[in-house]
Image (cartoon, helix red, strand yellow):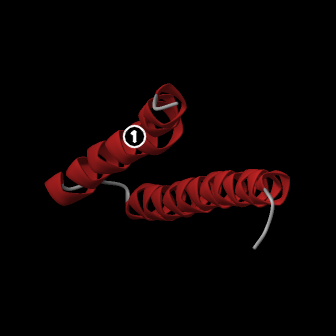
Amino acid sequence: MMNDNTMVLIQKLGNRLVDTFHYIALFVIGATIVWSAAHDYIDMIRTGHANLEDILLLFIWNWVQWWVFILKPIVYLCSF
């Protein structure tokens, strides 16, 4: 059986790995959303107009960005 110091060390390492993965995943999700929004925005500029679906999609992307980069890290950090 492992002693308490080893278990604490393993727990700390696991927590750090989970936190690191969490922030990497948030960055990847956010970068994908920005890339997708930029791609569609360029298409709107190219066509010279935006229809209702395009405008609503931009609002949805804006909300998701707010959730991913502002609200979710605040909720995550306040949970400790």
* 3 sits to left or right of 43: right
Q: Is residue 8 above or below residue 59?
A: below
Q: What kind of element bears circle 1?
A: helix
Residue underneath mark 1: 67
Q: Is residue 40 left or right of residue 7?
A: left
Quarter of the picture containing the N terminus is bottom right
Please identify the quarter of the rendering in which residue 35 is found. Answer: bottom right
Identify the residue at image location x=18%, y=58%.
Answer: 53
Q: Position of residue 54 (x, y in %)?
A: 26, 56
Quadrant housing residue 62: top left
Residue 44, position as x, y percentages in the image:
39, 58
Residue positioned 65% across, 59% down in the render: 18
Q: 11 and 35: which one is in front?
A: 11
Q: Residue 10 appears at what percent x and percent y?
A: 77, 61
Type of amino acid at the residue the image marks with label 1 = Trp
Q: Nearer the viewer, residue 20 or 4?
A: 4
Q: Residue at x 44, y 65 (%)?
A: 43
- State the residue in front, 22 or 42: 22
Look at the picture and state if 72 lies above or below 47. above
